[in-house]
Amino acid sequence: MHKATRDKEKIFKLANQKNAMTKKGMVEVVAIILLLLVAVALVGVAFVWFKGLQSNIQSGVETQSQKTIESFNIDLKIFNTIYEAGELTLWLKNDGTTIVTITGESLLNIKDFNNKEICTEKIKDLTKDIVSINPGASEKIVANVKDKCQLSQGSYIVLVGFQDGSASGSFNIA
């Protein structure tokens, strides 16, 4: 063969090898770019998810904090108590800043002055009076304790327990 032909063949082989090497390098560069794009996308998704999670947690904490603050502003007092013919009438006053609700699940507890428990009953077992007392307002509950509490002549302490606190007072049976 002629030397010029051999030189052309060598040049052609070298050009093909160089071209193949360039294509092989391009595949690696494209693969790295794709991996970087996937990583950036995953970081973006994680950021959005964590930001939403943080927002939900923060709003939950704010709500619970507000409820806790409101529960510290409860000031319910029994300002008058009368026992007559088996019925105990309680006048309650809300001096706090939040509404107080006495539900059927609230408890009425009566003790003697020696702190001996006479009876503890759910309000729903003693009365149909379920009351919500607005701040600054007063309400009356009439509880039929005749069948549930064995009371005789003497002085007693009465305690009304509700979800966020309690109120106490006293009464006498002559």
Image: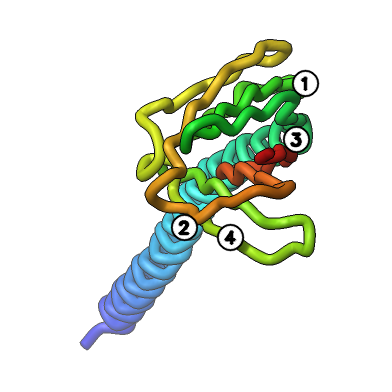
Which residue occupies the extreme top position in the image? 137
Task: Label 3, secondary structure: give it.
Answer: helix
Q: Which mark is residue 128?
A: none
Residue 119 lies, in percent from the top left, at 53, 58
Residue 47 visible in image: no
Nearer to us of marks 3 and 4 is 4
Residue 117 lies, in percent from the top left, at 63, 63
Task: Label 4, secondary structure: give it.
Answer: strand
Task: Label 2, secondary structure: give it.
Answer: helix
Amino acid type of disc 3? Ile
From the viewer's perspective, tell me whether residue 54 is left or right of residue 75: left
Q: Which residue is mark 4?
A: 118
Amino acid type of disc 2? Ile
Q: Residues within 10 Å of mark 1 (few under 14, many from 20)?
A: some
Instruction: State how far apart marks 4 and 1 are (Cα).
Output: 28 Å
Q: Residue at x 65, y 24 (%)?
A: 92
Q: Quadrant of the N terminus?
A: bottom left
**C-beta proximity under 8 Å, tags 2 and 1:** no
